Image (cartoon, grey):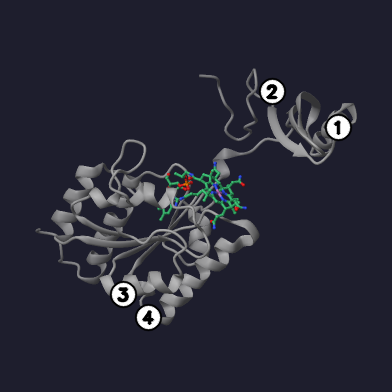
Amino acid sequence: MPQVDLKSVRPYGDTLDDGKVQLGFTLPIRYGPEAKEAARQLVMKMGFEGADVVSAHDLGGHFTYFVVYGKCVHSVDVTSLRVPKVEVEQMDFFKINDLVRDKLGRKITVVAACTGSDAHTVGIDAIINMKGYAGEYGLERYPWFRAHNLGAQVPNETLVAKAIDTDADAILVSQVVTQRNVHIANMTRLVDLLEAEGIRDDVILVAGGPRISHELALELGYDAGFGPGTLPSHVAAYIAQEMVRKEHRTSPDLGKER
Ligand code: B12
Protein backbone atom coordinates (compact mmCIF):
# COMPACT_ATOMS: atom_id res chain seq x y z
CA MET A 1 0.00 0.00 0.00
CA PRO A 2 1.29 3.47 -0.87
CA GLN A 3 1.84 5.88 2.02
CA VAL A 4 -1.18 8.17 1.65
CA ASP A 5 -1.27 11.51 3.45
CA LEU A 6 -4.88 11.59 4.60
CA LYS A 7 -4.62 15.32 5.25
CA SER A 8 -3.99 15.93 1.55
CA VAL A 9 -5.64 13.37 -0.70
CA ARG A 10 -5.61 13.83 -4.48
CA PRO A 11 -6.97 11.74 -7.35
CA TYR A 12 -4.83 8.75 -8.29
CA GLY A 13 -4.27 8.30 -12.05
CA ASP A 14 -1.06 6.41 -12.84
CA THR A 15 0.88 7.33 -9.72
CA LEU A 16 0.15 8.54 -6.21
CA ASP A 17 -0.74 12.23 -6.02
CA ASP A 18 -0.60 12.85 -9.79
CA GLY A 19 -4.11 14.35 -9.52
CA LYS A 20 -5.27 12.86 -12.84
CA VAL A 21 -9.03 12.73 -13.43
CA GLN A 22 -11.26 11.74 -16.31
CA LEU A 23 -14.32 13.81 -17.15
CA GLY A 24 -17.15 12.83 -19.46
CA PHE A 25 -19.67 15.35 -20.75
CA THR A 26 -21.71 16.47 -23.74
CA LEU A 27 -21.67 19.87 -25.37
CA PRO A 28 -24.54 21.07 -27.56
CA ILE A 29 -22.22 21.79 -30.51
CA ARG A 30 -21.38 20.03 -33.78
CA TYR A 31 -18.50 17.51 -33.78
CA GLY A 32 -15.19 18.90 -35.15
CA PRO A 33 -11.87 20.53 -34.18
CA GLU A 34 -13.62 23.59 -32.72
CA ALA A 35 -15.79 21.38 -30.55
CA LYS A 36 -12.69 19.61 -29.16
CA GLU A 37 -11.01 22.92 -28.43
CA ALA A 38 -14.18 24.16 -26.72
CA ALA A 39 -14.17 21.08 -24.47
CA ARG A 40 -10.47 21.51 -23.67
CA GLN A 41 -10.89 25.17 -22.77
CA LEU A 42 -13.92 24.46 -20.65
CA VAL A 43 -12.01 21.88 -18.60
CA MET A 44 -9.11 24.35 -18.13
CA LYS A 45 -11.66 26.91 -16.92
CA MET A 46 -12.93 24.35 -14.42
CA GLY A 47 -9.48 24.62 -12.84
CA PHE A 48 -7.82 21.49 -14.22
CA GLU A 49 -4.28 21.66 -15.58
CA GLY A 50 -3.05 19.99 -18.77
CA ALA A 51 -6.52 19.28 -20.19
CA ASP A 52 -6.35 16.69 -22.95
CA VAL A 53 -9.35 15.63 -25.06
CA VAL A 54 -8.78 11.90 -25.45
CA SER A 55 -12.08 11.07 -27.07
CA ALA A 56 -14.79 12.99 -28.92
CA HIS A 57 -17.90 11.32 -30.32
CA ASP A 58 -20.34 12.77 -32.76
CA LEU A 59 -23.76 12.22 -31.15
CA GLY A 60 -25.52 13.50 -34.26
CA GLY A 61 -26.96 16.92 -34.98
CA HIS A 62 -25.58 19.53 -32.68
CA PHE A 63 -24.19 17.30 -29.95
CA THR A 64 -20.71 15.98 -29.19
CA TYR A 65 -19.64 13.77 -26.29
CA PHE A 66 -16.14 14.15 -24.82
CA VAL A 67 -13.79 12.33 -22.54
CA VAL A 68 -11.12 14.69 -21.23
CA TYR A 69 -8.17 14.02 -18.93
CA GLY A 70 -6.92 16.77 -16.64
CA LYS A 71 -4.87 17.29 -13.53
CA CYS A 72 -6.67 18.35 -10.38
CA VAL A 73 -4.57 20.75 -8.34
CA HIS A 74 -6.70 20.54 -5.21
CA SER A 75 -6.60 18.09 -2.34
CA VAL A 76 -8.91 17.20 0.52
CA ASP A 77 -8.23 16.65 4.22
CA VAL A 78 -10.01 13.37 4.88
CA THR A 79 -9.22 13.50 8.61
CA SER A 80 -11.40 16.61 8.99
CA LEU A 81 -14.53 15.14 7.42
CA ARG A 82 -17.63 14.47 9.48
CA VAL A 83 -20.29 12.80 7.35
CA PRO A 84 -23.66 12.00 8.93
CA LYS A 85 -24.36 8.31 8.41
CA VAL A 86 -26.88 5.83 9.65
CA GLU A 87 -25.51 4.43 12.92
CA VAL A 88 -26.23 0.73 12.77
CA GLU A 89 -24.50 -2.53 13.45
CA GLN A 90 -24.58 -4.55 10.24
CA MET A 91 -26.38 -7.86 10.71
CA ASP A 92 -27.50 -10.65 8.42
CA PHE A 93 -31.02 -11.93 7.78
CA PHE A 94 -30.87 -14.48 10.61
CA LYS A 95 -29.44 -12.17 13.26
CA ILE A 96 -31.97 -9.46 12.43
CA ASN A 97 -34.90 -11.85 12.79
CA ASP A 98 -33.45 -13.22 16.03
CA LEU A 99 -33.09 -9.69 17.39
CA VAL A 100 -36.73 -8.81 16.65
CA ARG A 101 -37.99 -12.10 18.08
CA ASP A 102 -35.86 -11.91 21.23
CA LYS A 103 -36.00 -8.19 22.01
CA LEU A 104 -39.40 -7.14 20.67
CA GLY A 105 -41.35 -10.38 20.62
CA ARG A 106 -43.64 -9.18 17.85
CA LYS A 107 -43.49 -8.51 14.13
CA ILE A 108 -42.40 -5.12 12.82
CA THR A 109 -44.84 -3.62 10.32
CA VAL A 110 -43.48 -1.46 7.52
CA VAL A 111 -45.31 0.32 4.72
CA ALA A 112 -43.35 1.37 1.67
CA ALA A 113 -43.99 3.31 -1.50
CA CYS A 114 -42.53 5.30 -4.30
CA THR A 115 -44.45 8.52 -3.79
CA GLY A 116 -45.76 11.50 -5.69
CA SER A 117 -45.27 11.39 -9.45
CA ASP A 118 -42.26 9.09 -9.16
CA ALA A 119 -42.70 5.77 -10.99
CA HIS A 120 -39.26 4.27 -10.34
CA THR A 121 -40.15 1.21 -8.30
CA VAL A 122 -37.02 -0.87 -8.88
CA GLY A 123 -35.26 0.61 -5.84
CA ILE A 124 -38.05 0.14 -3.31
CA ASP A 125 -38.82 -3.31 -4.77
CA ALA A 126 -35.18 -4.25 -4.22
CA ILE A 127 -35.57 -3.50 -0.52
CA ILE A 128 -39.05 -4.89 0.05
CA ASN A 129 -39.88 -7.62 -2.42
CA MET A 130 -39.51 -11.28 -1.55
CA LYS A 131 -36.92 -11.94 -4.23
CA GLY A 132 -34.75 -9.11 -2.94
CA TYR A 133 -31.61 -7.69 -4.47
CA ALA A 134 -27.95 -8.50 -4.99
CA GLY A 135 -28.28 -11.95 -3.48
CA GLU A 136 -30.27 -10.81 -0.42
CA TYR A 137 -33.91 -11.38 0.40
CA GLY A 138 -36.20 -8.37 0.67
CA LEU A 139 -38.18 -7.51 3.82
CA GLU A 140 -41.22 -9.51 2.66
CA ARG A 141 -39.12 -12.64 3.23
CA TYR A 142 -38.22 -11.73 6.84
CA PRO A 143 -40.48 -13.77 9.14
CA TRP A 144 -40.34 -11.05 11.83
CA PHE A 145 -41.35 -8.25 9.45
CA ARG A 146 -44.76 -7.56 7.92
CA ALA A 147 -44.09 -5.55 4.76
CA HIS A 148 -46.61 -3.70 2.60
CA ASN A 149 -45.28 -2.37 -0.69
CA LEU A 150 -47.77 0.07 -2.19
CA GLY A 151 -45.84 0.49 -5.45
CA ALA A 152 -45.46 3.51 -7.73
CA GLN A 153 -46.86 7.04 -7.79
CA VAL A 154 -48.52 6.69 -4.41
CA PRO A 155 -50.00 9.93 -3.04
CA ASN A 156 -48.58 10.85 0.37
CA GLU A 157 -52.13 10.80 1.73
CA THR A 158 -52.58 7.15 0.68
CA LEU A 159 -49.30 6.18 2.30
CA VAL A 160 -50.22 7.89 5.56
CA ALA A 161 -53.68 6.26 5.53
CA LYS A 162 -52.08 2.83 5.04
CA ALA A 163 -49.64 3.51 7.87
CA ILE A 164 -52.52 4.35 10.20
CA ASP A 165 -54.60 1.41 8.98
CA THR A 166 -51.81 -1.12 9.58
CA ASP A 167 -50.49 0.57 12.73
CA ALA A 168 -47.12 0.72 10.99
CA ASP A 169 -43.86 0.91 12.90
CA ALA A 170 -41.94 2.28 9.94
CA ILE A 171 -42.67 4.17 6.73
CA LEU A 172 -40.28 3.73 3.81
CA VAL A 173 -40.30 6.25 0.98
CA SER A 174 -38.46 6.00 -2.30
CA GLN A 175 -37.60 9.09 -4.32
CA VAL A 176 -35.62 8.66 -7.52
CA VAL A 177 -36.62 11.64 -9.64
CA THR A 178 -35.01 14.81 -8.31
CA GLN A 179 -35.67 17.15 -11.22
CA ARG A 180 -36.67 20.61 -10.00
CA ASN A 181 -36.25 19.31 -6.45
CA VAL A 182 -39.57 17.52 -6.67
CA HIS A 183 -38.29 15.02 -4.09
CA ILE A 184 -37.74 17.77 -1.51
CA ALA A 185 -41.29 19.08 -1.84
CA ASN A 186 -42.69 15.58 -1.80
CA MET A 187 -40.71 14.36 1.20
CA THR A 188 -41.49 17.53 3.14
CA ARG A 189 -45.21 17.13 2.44
CA LEU A 190 -45.15 13.64 3.93
CA VAL A 191 -43.62 14.91 7.18
CA ASP A 192 -46.26 17.67 7.31
CA LEU A 193 -49.05 15.13 6.87
CA LEU A 194 -47.64 12.84 9.56
CA GLU A 195 -47.38 15.77 11.94
CA ALA A 196 -50.92 16.87 11.13
CA GLU A 197 -52.12 13.34 11.95
CA GLY A 198 -50.10 13.44 15.18
CA ILE A 199 -48.20 10.25 14.35
CA ARG A 200 -44.79 11.52 13.25
CA ASP A 201 -43.09 10.37 16.46
CA ASP A 202 -44.85 7.00 16.42
CA VAL A 203 -43.11 5.83 13.25
CA ILE A 204 -39.57 5.37 12.03
CA LEU A 205 -39.45 7.45 8.87
CA VAL A 206 -36.95 6.31 6.26
CA ALA A 207 -36.19 7.71 2.82
CA GLY A 208 -34.12 6.18 0.06
CA GLY A 209 -32.99 6.68 -3.51
CA PRO A 210 -29.90 7.24 -5.63
CA ARG A 211 -29.65 10.90 -4.67
CA ILE A 212 -30.82 10.58 -1.06
CA SER A 213 -28.21 10.95 1.67
CA HIS A 214 -28.63 10.47 5.39
CA GLU A 215 -27.80 14.15 5.80
CA LEU A 216 -30.58 15.27 3.45
CA ALA A 217 -33.05 12.92 5.11
CA LEU A 218 -32.24 14.34 8.55
CA GLU A 219 -32.59 17.89 7.22
CA LEU A 220 -36.08 17.09 5.95
CA GLY A 221 -37.21 15.62 9.25
CA TYR A 222 -36.64 11.93 8.54
CA ASP A 223 -34.92 9.46 10.84
CA ALA A 224 -32.64 7.97 8.20
CA GLY A 225 -31.71 8.16 4.55
CA PHE A 226 -30.24 5.41 2.38
CA GLY A 227 -28.50 5.96 -0.95
CA PRO A 228 -27.24 3.90 -3.87
CA GLY A 229 -26.11 0.35 -3.18
CA THR A 230 -28.36 -0.09 -0.14
CA LEU A 231 -29.11 -3.72 0.66
CA PRO A 232 -32.32 -4.98 2.31
CA SER A 233 -30.35 -6.10 5.37
CA HIS A 234 -29.00 -2.54 5.90
CA VAL A 235 -32.56 -1.26 6.16
CA ALA A 236 -33.90 -4.19 8.18
CA ALA A 237 -31.00 -3.97 10.64
CA TYR A 238 -31.54 -0.24 11.09
CA ILE A 239 -35.29 -0.57 11.67
CA ALA A 240 -34.89 -3.54 14.03
CA GLN A 241 -32.21 -1.83 16.11
CA GLU A 242 -34.11 1.46 16.15
CA MET A 243 -37.27 -0.34 17.29
CA VAL A 244 -35.37 -1.99 20.13
CA ARG A 245 -33.87 1.38 21.12
CA LYS A 246 -37.32 2.98 21.04
CA GLU A 247 -38.92 0.25 23.15
CA HIS A 248 -36.14 0.56 25.72
CA ARG A 249 -36.59 4.33 25.88
CA THR A 250 -40.35 4.08 26.51
CA SER A 251 -40.23 1.08 28.85
CA PRO A 252 -36.70 0.37 30.10
CA ASP A 253 -37.49 -3.14 31.38
CA LEU A 254 -39.07 -4.33 28.19
CA GLY A 255 -37.23 -6.88 26.12
CA LYS A 256 -34.44 -7.48 28.62
CA GLU A 257 -35.43 -11.00 29.62
CA ARG A 258 -37.16 -12.03 26.44
C1 B12 B 1 -35.48 2.09 -15.04
C2 B12 B 1 -35.63 3.60 -15.18
C3 B12 B 1 -36.88 4.09 -15.54
C4 B12 B 1 -38.11 3.20 -15.72
C5 B12 B 1 -38.68 2.91 -14.29
C6 B12 B 1 -39.37 1.54 -14.25
C7 B12 B 1 -39.66 1.15 -12.84
N1 B12 B 1 -40.71 0.37 -12.70
O1 B12 B 1 -38.98 1.50 -11.90
C8 B12 B 1 -39.04 4.11 -16.59
C9 B12 B 1 -38.80 3.81 -18.06
C10 B12 B 1 -40.53 4.01 -16.30
C11 B12 B 1 -38.47 5.49 -16.28
C12 B12 B 1 -39.18 6.65 -16.50
C13 B12 B 1 -38.66 7.91 -16.29
N2 B12 B 1 -37.39 8.22 -15.92
CO1 B12 B 1 -36.07 6.89 -15.37
N3 B12 B 1 -34.62 5.77 -15.05
C14 B12 B 1 -34.52 4.48 -14.96
C15 B12 B 1 -33.04 4.10 -14.74
C16 B12 B 1 -32.47 3.65 -16.09
C17 B12 B 1 -32.76 3.00 -13.72
C18 B12 B 1 -33.37 3.22 -12.34
C19 B12 B 1 -33.25 1.92 -11.59
O2 B12 B 1 -34.07 1.05 -11.71
N4 B12 B 1 -32.14 1.74 -10.79
C20 B12 B 1 -31.86 0.49 -10.09
C21 B12 B 1 -32.27 0.58 -8.59
C22 B12 B 1 -32.01 -0.78 -7.92
O3 B12 B 1 -31.45 1.54 -8.01
P1 B12 B 1 -32.01 2.73 -7.07
O4 B12 B 1 -33.30 3.24 -7.58
O5 B12 B 1 -30.91 3.68 -6.86
O6 B12 B 1 -32.35 1.99 -5.70
C23 B12 B 1 -31.35 1.61 -4.77
C24 B12 B 1 -31.01 2.71 -3.75
O7 B12 B 1 -31.14 4.01 -4.23
C25 B12 B 1 -31.90 2.41 -2.58
N5 B12 B 1 -33.27 2.88 -2.54
C26 B12 B 1 -34.09 3.31 -3.51
N6 B12 B 1 -35.28 3.63 -3.00
C27 B12 B 1 -35.25 3.37 -1.68
C28 B12 B 1 -36.19 3.53 -0.68
C29 B12 B 1 -35.86 3.20 0.64
C30 B12 B 1 -36.87 3.38 1.71
C31 B12 B 1 -34.56 2.72 0.93
C32 B12 B 1 -34.23 2.38 2.32
C33 B12 B 1 -33.62 2.55 -0.07
C34 B12 B 1 -33.97 2.89 -1.37
O8 B12 B 1 -31.92 1.00 -2.57
C35 B12 B 1 -31.94 0.51 -3.91
C36 B12 B 1 -31.12 -0.76 -3.92
O9 B12 B 1 -29.78 -0.50 -3.59
C37 B12 B 1 -32.44 5.47 -14.25
C38 B12 B 1 -30.99 5.74 -14.66
C39 B12 B 1 -30.02 4.95 -13.83
N7 B12 B 1 -29.12 4.26 -14.48
O10 B12 B 1 -30.11 4.96 -12.60
C40 B12 B 1 -33.37 6.48 -14.93
C41 B12 B 1 -33.63 7.80 -14.25
C42 B12 B 1 -33.85 7.59 -12.78
N8 B12 B 1 -34.86 8.25 -14.89
C43 B12 B 1 -34.92 9.52 -15.09
C44 B12 B 1 -35.99 10.23 -15.70
C45 B12 B 1 -35.78 11.69 -15.95
C46 B12 B 1 -37.17 9.58 -16.05
C47 B12 B 1 -38.39 10.22 -16.72
C48 B12 B 1 -38.78 11.58 -16.18
C49 B12 B 1 -38.10 10.25 -18.22
C50 B12 B 1 -39.16 10.96 -19.04
N9 B12 B 1 -38.82 12.15 -19.51
O11 B12 B 1 -40.23 10.45 -19.21
C51 B12 B 1 -39.47 9.15 -16.47
C52 B12 B 1 -40.22 9.49 -15.17
C53 B12 B 1 -41.31 8.55 -14.88
C54 B12 B 1 -41.91 8.87 -13.55
N10 B12 B 1 -43.13 9.38 -13.54
O12 B12 B 1 -41.25 8.69 -12.52
C55 B12 B 1 -33.65 10.21 -14.58
C56 B12 B 1 -33.88 10.96 -13.28
C57 B12 B 1 -33.11 12.26 -13.26
C58 B12 B 1 -33.32 12.97 -11.97
N11 B12 B 1 -32.24 13.21 -11.26
O13 B12 B 1 -34.40 13.32 -11.60
C59 B12 B 1 -32.65 9.01 -14.54
C60 B12 B 1 -31.54 9.16 -13.49
C61 B12 B 1 -32.06 8.89 -15.96
C62 B12 B 1 -31.20 10.07 -16.34
N12 B12 B 1 -29.88 9.98 -16.22
O14 B12 B 1 -31.67 11.08 -16.75
N13 B12 B 1 -37.21 5.40 -15.79
Three-letter code, disc 3:
Ile
Quadrant of the image occupied by residue 31: top right
Residue, x 86% and y 32% (percent of image)?
A: 35
Characterize the local packing of mark 1: few (<14), some (14-19) or many (20 or more) Cα atoms within 10 angstroms.
many
Q: Mark 4 points at which residue?
A: 198
Characterize the local packing of mark 3: few (<14), some (14-19) or many (20 or more) Cα atoms within 10 angstroms.
some
Quarter of the image where the C terminus is located: bottom left
Measure the alpha-carbon separation of dots 3 and 4: 11 Å
Three-letter code, disc 2:
Asp
Measure the alpha-carbon separation of dots 2 and 3: 56 Å
Report the side of 51 relative to 230 (left or right). right
Front: mark 4 or 2: 4
Helix, strand or loop at mark 4: loop
Characterize the local packing of mark 2: few (<14), some (14-19) or many (20 or more) Cα atoms within 10 angstroms.
some
Residue 18's label in the rendered image is 2
The mark nearer the N terminus, 2 or 3, is: 2
- Mark 2 touches mark 3? (CB < 8 Å): no
Q: Name the residue under label 3.
A: 164
Residue at the front extreme? 61
Quadrant of the image occupied by residue 198: bottom left
Three-letter code, disc 1:
Ala
- Image height check: is 223 above or below 73? below
Residue 47's label in the rendered image is none
